[in-house]
Amino acid sequence: MGNWQYEADLGIDHEGFRQAIGNIGPYADEAELVAAVQAAFGSTLGDLRRDHPRFGEYPDGTEGIPETAEILGGTLTRYSDNGTDDEWSLDINP
């Protein structure tokens, strides 16, 4: 499979629905990404925009979302040069 790379989609609660706003990654180590997602809990969208060097925003996912929206969870995925591992994912919640 090659070397795995890990990234996570981050979600917020917006008007009663969970919404993906962007991702963080890639990381070469699963544990490092888990720690980064856990550290993002309690952060806001504005915090990530300002402070997280590996945050990739989804423009369609953040349209109309206030800067104060808090990160509530993340879904980890992994991929290699051969593509995404569709049989592996991990949800991280506070």
Image: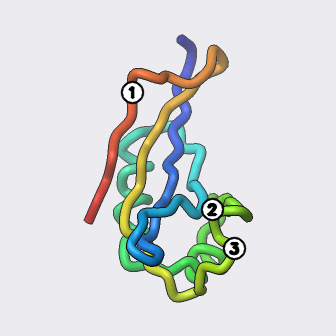
- Number of the front mark, 1 or 2: 1
Q: Which mark is residue 78?
A: none
Q: Position of residue 3 (x, y in %)?
A: 55, 22
Give the Cα distance between marks 2 and 3: 16 Å
Residue under the image location 67 percent in, 58 percent down: 56
Q: Amino acid at mark 2?
A: Phe
Q: Pinpoint residue 17: horizontal percent, then vertical percent.
A: 42, 67
How far apart marks 3 and 1 lie (CA) works out to: 29 Å
Q: Which residue is mark 3?
A: 63
> Which label number is shown at residue 55?
2
| Of pointers 3 and 1, the one earlier in the residue sequence | 3
Alpha carbon separation for disc pair 1 and 2 = 22 Å
Mark 2: few/some/many CA within 10 Å (<14, 14-19, 20+): many
Which residue position holds label 1?
A: 88
Residue 84 in percent (x, y) is at 56, 25
N-term-proximal mark, 1 vs 2 = 2
* In this view, 16 is above or below 87: below
Of label 2 and label 3, which has the lower sequence position?
2
Question: At x 43% / y 43%, what residue is drawn?
Answer: 76
Question: Residue 11, percent across and down?
Answer: 46, 62
